[in-house]
Structure formats: C-alpha cells, structure tokens
Image (cartoon, coloured by chain):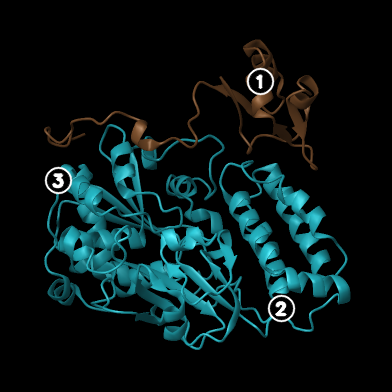
Chain colours: A cyan, B brown
Amino acid sequence: MTAVLTNTVPVGYVGAPRLMRTLDADLTGHLAGHGTLPALSRDALLALLDAAPLAGRGGAGFPLATKIRALGRGEPIVVVNGAEGEPVSAKDRALLSRVPHLVLDGAQLLATAVGGRRVLVAVSDPGLLGPLKQALAERPDAGVRFELRTVPDRFVAGEARALVSALNGGSAVPPGRRVLPTDRGVDGRPTLLGNTETLAQLAVLARTGRAGFGSTGTPAEPGTTLLTVTGAVASPGVLEVPLGTPLGTVAQAVGAEPAQTVVVGGYHGAWLRPAPTLPISRAGLTAAGGTLGAGVLIFVGRQTCALAELTRVAHWLAGESAKQCGPCSFGLPALAAELARLTAGRAAKRELLRTANQLPGRGACAHPDGAVRFLRSGLALLTEEAQLHGAYGSCRRTDLGQLATTRTGWR
Amino acid sequence: MRLEIDWTRCAGHGLCAALLPQAIGRDDWGYPILDRARLDRLPAADLKRVVSCCPALALRLEKSRLEKPRPEKLRPEKPRSEKAPQPR
C-alpha cells in the first residue's frame, strides 16, 4: 500500500461554507456546527428530494430520488462510493478525511429511510481508513452497521457496477450484462450507491430543509458544489462554491493564470473557452458544451502545449481501459497514437475523427464514450495549435503537465 | 426483440457480420457495428440464428431495452411506507 497524503488536501470556499463548515472536527464539534441529524421516513425523504432535487455528485448527475424509487424488494444495502478514480479529483477524499461525520450522517439517514441496516464505505485511498475508523468509533449505535472496504485505485473502479463487482469479491470492472445495482447489487441485494459528496449534501439538506438549502445556488440547482481546481493556478485545492458561481470568481479564488482553455468535468469531460461569466452549474456547463461531472476544473495556461497535454491524457485514457471490450481496448490506443502523430504534424484530423466515431456506445461501460467526448472537444477547441503543429510539427511550447495523469499526494 | 452484444465476450470473430451483412458491419478491428434500423426490419428467425451462431456466445436477444431506462418507469411506485421495512 502506498502512503497517500490525504490530510494535506487544501480546502477553501467561495461564500459561506456548508459541507466544509466543521473541518477536522470530532463528533461533538460536528454536531455543534450542524445540529443533530433528523431521522426521515422514506416518504419524508422522497418529498424532500422532490422539493430540492439532489443530483448525484459522482459524475453522471443521476437524481438520488430516482435511485431510491428504483430499489427492488428486500433489505437494501447502502454504499458510500469513495472510489475516486479521476486522478485530479480530490473532493471525495477531502470530505472523508476532513468532514467524515457529515458523509456518515448522510449514509445513515439514507439507510434508515429505506430500511437498510448495512452501509459499506468503499474507498480507493487506504489513507482514508484511519480518519474513518476514528470517526466511526466516536459515533453512537444508530442501528446501522458501517463496514470499511478498500477497492483498487483505477479510473473505472468508481463506476457503480464495477464497484459492486469489486465489493462482491470480483475484479473492479463493469460486467458485460447490464444489471442494475438497485435490483441486484452487493451480495445480490438491492443496493443504493451514493457518491461521497451526494451523501454529505444529503446530510446538510435533511437539516436545513428545502428553503434553507436553497438560500444559495440557483433556483434549479440549489446549494453548493465541490470543485477540485488545478492546473495553472497559484493555490490548487478543493473549493466549495454556490452552484452558479461564475468561472471568473473561481479563477480569482485560486489565483489562476490567464488561461487559454479550461477542462471541466475531468477526463470524461470537455474543453471550454475560459469565459469569466461561465456559470459553474450543471445547466450552465452543459449549455456551454461541457459537463460538471465530478467537479474537476483544470485551468490550462498559455505557456503549455495543450495539444501535447491532450495527447498524454489520451494515452492515459487508453491505459485505463479495463481491456474487456474490443472497441475500447483497440480503439483508444489507436486514437492516442493518431493524436501523437497529429501533434508531431504527421497526420490529419479527419482520420482521427473517423477512428473516434467508431467507439461510442460500444462497450460494457461508458469509458470509450467519455474518453472520445473529451478528446473530440479538445481537438475542436485546439484548432490553432493543431494548425501550428501541422505546419511546423510544434507550437514551440512543451507539455507542462497541467493535466495531471498521476496522483502524487493528491495532485 | 432487440439484439444486444456483451462486449466483454465478443472477440470479433465476425460470423454475425457474415450472416447478416445487410445489417451488421465491422469496425477497423473486426468488431460488429449494428445498424439498428435495418436489424429492426429483419425477421426474428434471422436474429435468433445469428445469436445461436456466435462462437463467443456474446449475442443475445432482449425483449425490451433495459440499459438506459427511465427508471421512474422501471417499476410502479409501491406503497411501501405504510408497512414497516420488511425484516429479513
């Protein structure tokens, strides 16, 4: 096991902090800051979620209420999805290491409401086990048994069905047949998976109610969201911001260099022009052709060769393929190789797009789809660079590694 | 009936594309590309035959489309709240 500097994740906020209100507090401090956790029945919880829709914060943005309604018969199991496979993302580990009680509150509330008695907390970073064990030891028995599990630290391991497979003792890859975890998940039981941040938000929402929760954010997307902000910035870290905060405000908060582009949503996300007015919300980013995803925001500075950064990420995405499905295991390396040739000025974009078009929708999971979306949007934005590389084989800049593909500490 | 591929099983043998060239093509690496519109117009017997001929057992027929359901329609709302959660 590798030592990971979990407790060094820098955390900040724009506006008043919610999730991050009681950083590093013990149970007493946590309860003093947030108040006691109410118990909600299934109906009360669904009514609350209908009033204040909570979209999943793991990347897909799937509404929590829909998952609850889809649960099959039998005693369900709740899983805290802390398998944070995105190499840049650090928000889940920030929550689990610095406000673990809030996450555990959310899981406990959810389990109690749906009649579950087991909660599995699945993390990919073994450094989180210490803070979690300590937090669990402080909590009184609430009729819910928490179990800590570590799962492999790889990109696809956080995908819901891959995580279920890992928790069932299999490998952390998605199964070939589509079985919904809400029907048959961990130990064959109906399973409710929630991203770490989703559950922390739920613990806040249950206490504030709809009105209090909506005192910040946008009417359609009340509340705050966590961002992991990195790249060409002075102080990278995890930032809690009201939904709808303009990109310029975030750039200022982290001391971003003038950026040529910004990557939103991580390596299944998209490249966008860094318009300062761009609203950081699910709707705002989607309208701009991006996605909030799991909240990753990378400022790509003007000193780096963005095309070389894109190519490196393409190779990384190919390496993260579970190598289960042909189109993904052959297509992504082919795409990365073509991108490398394009960067060297020896290939045309048309051939590359022809390869890319063969991948989406043809795998057991959405990895090929997400990877192709990311690569296509980068190419669409980096036309000037591609022209320079086409003409001269270079743009006279080098890859400064602003799109991190390895995790050292949390960066 | 809808033809589905288990991509973790498919090894790109290409028998399906050879049997139904009018509806199944192959990509650069030999894996099948389904033309949904043309598959829908084929008799069920053709689909069953192609399923049974796959040497990797990677093809199957599904009654309804389950992979991207609108989950609120997946199962009717059960009035479970009146009852206590069923112990097991």
How far apart are labels 3 and 2 at the CA level? 54 Å
Which residue in the protein does label 1 denote?
A: B51
Which amino acid lies under the numbered mark 3 shown in the image of this protein? Ser
- What chain is tagged by disc 3? A
The mark closer to the camera, 3 or 2, is 2
Relative vertical location of residue A141 with respect to residue A3 in this rendering, above or below: above
- What chain is tagged by disc 1? B
Q: Are marks 3 and 2 in contact (CB under 8 Å)?
A: no
Callout 3: few (<14), some (14-19), or many (20+) C-alpha neighbours within 10 Å?
some
How far apart are labels 2 and 1 at the CA level? 48 Å
Relative vertical location of residue A256 with respect to residue A381 in this rendering, above or below: below
Q: Where does residue A160 sit, x and y in percent of width and height?
A: 45, 48
**Is residue A411 in view from this perspective?**
no
Callout 1: few (<14), some (14-19), or many (20+) C-alpha neighbours within 10 Å?
many
Badge 3 marks a residue whose secondary structure is loop
x 79%, y 37%: residue: B30
Does residue A31 appear left or right of residue A131 in this picture? left
Callout 2: few (<14), some (14-19), or many (20+) C-alpha neighbours within 10 Å?
many
Q: Are marks 3 and 1 in contact (CB under 8 Å)?
A: no
* Residue B35 quadrant: top right
The disc placed on residue A305 is 2
The one nearer the camera, A207 or B56, is A207
Badge 1 marks a residue whose secondary structure is helix
x 13%, y 53%: residue: A39
Q: Where does residue A319 sit, x and y in percent of width and height?
A: 67, 59
Does residue A185 appear left or right of residue B31 in this picture? left
Q: Quadrant of the N terminus of chain B?
A: top right
| Co-location on one chain, circles 3 and 1 | no
Which residue in the protein does label 3 denote?
A: A41
Badge 2 marks a residue whose secondary structure is loop
Which amino acid lies under the numbered mark 2 shown in the image of this protein? Cys
How far apart are labels 3 and 1 at the CA level? 47 Å
